Image: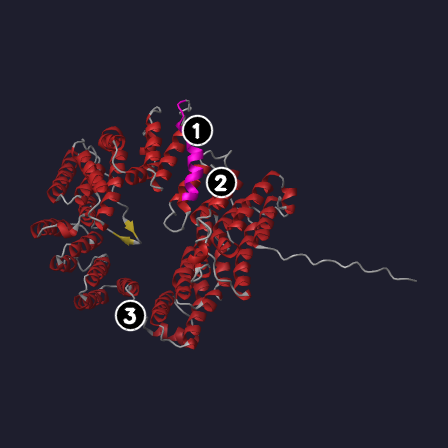
Amino acid sequence: MTQAASVPTNPAPPLTPVDSAIGALLQALRPAADGAAAVGEERSVYQPDTWLIQRCWEVLADAGAVQEALAVARLNALRQPLAIHQCLHRLSRQIDRHWGLAAAVAQPLHTVVAPLLRPDARGDAAQADQLLYGAATAANLDERTLAFACLERLDQFHQPWQRPTVQPDQRKLLAETVLRSGPHPLTAALIAFAVRRFDDAGAQLVGEISAGASEHLRHSSHAPKMARLLALSVAAMRNSTLTTLHARRVAATIFGQAGLVSEVLAQLTTVANIQLARRESGLPGRTPDQPVLRQVKRPNANSDIDFQVHTLCQAVRAMPQARLSNEERIELANQLAMLGGQSDGWTAAGAAATLLELGAVRFAVEMVEKIPAGDPTRVEGVIELVRGLLARGDATLAREQVQKGLTWARAYPGRNPERALIWGIAEIYLERDEPQHALAILDQRRGETGFFHRLRSRFSRKLTDDELHDDGLRLRAWLLQDRVSASELNTLVARLNTWAPRLLDGEARVSFLVDTMLKPLLLSGRTRLALSLLPTLQDALRTGVGEKHAARVAGVATALAAEFARPLDDAAELVEAVPAALPPVAPLDAATRTALEQFMRSIWQNDAGRGLWQVIHGIEGALPLLLALEGPQAVAQLAQRVNIAFQSPSRVEAV
């Protein structure tokens, strides 16, 4: 009896991350057999495939991958008429980061804009939006002629500036176009009549244009175009009737950007008079702030004073400080010192920080000291005062104010002020790269005392929320010092990794693991320790829902991609031969790549059982990491397979 010859079988190729993402998507597309309830989705504007394809080309455009981004955007062209134009605009904002990108974007831009400039264009809302994006893209590419041609063609439509001025996203786009294109009869008329025609929305448009112009003038005083735009903005606010308090706040900011101190104070006086008239007449004023802010009650807050202080602080911060005379500084400081003490500690904190910018150190210290001892918001005043003093280089006075603040906080009933003050000061020192001072202030915090605390500590070694936060700050300080032993660091990371899931939930757990542990470890080069946190992060991300889930996953993926997608040292030389190409990255070792891929797969597998939109958001959040590991071709392939999956799920396996 002869035996049948065995037929050799080829092993199946390993699944790529794209295969895993598509597998999770197909699983979510199948109806649940066990009747499990899927996670609902509040989105009603986009279909799932349309939304994920859009997120794919947005990620590709942010990375400067021209060909891949445009190819994916074309998949959505029929469902989203603005997809190609939005993609080109998003690419044009990256021209300073990628060599040759401007030339690569200019060619398709001329192709898509040419039909819009014909006299027989329909002039509907879709074409108006396309012209606005075309003008913004051309302005980013420094093609002023094309930008002005798009704006002039748009001006021929019916009510062309209503939607671009009123809608916030389009208003930002229009302000960017005007700012980059420079003065022109059309843009000058738009600025001059914006407030008269569109009220608060027009004032906001003028404010955004002037903010960009003043920012350019801060870096370069020899910018005649920016100076002209700022002068046009000032003239527009002077010659318009301002009917709302918001418009007057914007006007004060614009006058501050131009260094017009007297006109800023005149606007502030007008605001105070309007508020007084409203109070005396009994007319309803602006809606007061919520009584609880950051879990702190504000029983002594005055909403009218808060509005005035915020207006003045915003105007002072916008002023060119070097051009202010001593008399103008004194006048502003006197006005701010008079108003800052008429509300609570939150308002005094903002006023003190602005006083320090004006150089009025004595006024700032006195303002914080005058906050009532029974007002818990005094903590914010002390923190802002210390931050401003350290920024001025007065470390001795800053330490003195820290000790005064600690004396007050320890006399206050309860432990919240002391805890908030010490943590806030420690954060300031860590931001300034002074870990030794952060550790010193943490050592001054008093722990819990009493019989029951000693009893619990004796029979069980449990961390509290406060100790967890202390150790998180201590970990960041140790990583900045770079003098701690490996065993101590490993022990602290293991303790935090164990107790954070037990003590924190939801957003607080994810934020602690990412901001306090993952990012500092990656920045310090402890990649092994950082990768050891991924299983804990996977469990923390399982409870997310909807767009919040996408944002949480994106936060982790972006941090990992920033570390493991660093360009090679000689990347600039390699890219010169290929315009607009992404720089090559250093290859990853097998263990690191496996850990990162497993992280993405676990997220998608968990999301697949919770509904279609949930897995869409999970894939969307992981796109930065997928781009870093597999390159732009993988993201483009994912978009193409998603498009096929929703049209014919049986064909997607063959792609």
- Amino acid type shown at disc 1: Pro
Is residue 505 in sight in this rendering? no
Residue marked by disc 1: 115
Quadrant location of the N terminus? bottom right
Residue at the (30%, 62%) spot, across then down: 431
- Direction from residue 604 to residue 451 in the image, left or right: left
How many discs mark residues in the rendered view? 3
The label on residue 445 is: 3
Q: Please, what secondary structure does the residue beneath circle 1 have?
A: helix
Q: Which residues are magenta?
A: 103-119
Q: Main secondary structure of the magenta part?
A: helix
- Amino acid type shown at disc 2: Ala
Residue marked by disc 2: 73
Residue 313 drawn at (x, y percent): 19, 49
Residue 112 on the magenta segment: yes
Q: Residues within 10 Å of mark 2 (few under 14, many from 20)?
A: many
Q: Earlier in the sequence, mark 3 or mark 2?
A: 2
Residue at the (16%, 51%) spot, across then down: 321
Q: Nearer the viewer, residue 310 or 360?
A: 360
Residue 309 drawn at (x, y percent): 18, 47
Q: Please, what secondary structure does the residue beneath circle 2 have?
A: helix
Tell me whether circle 3 and circle 1 mark residues in contact (CB < 8 Å): no
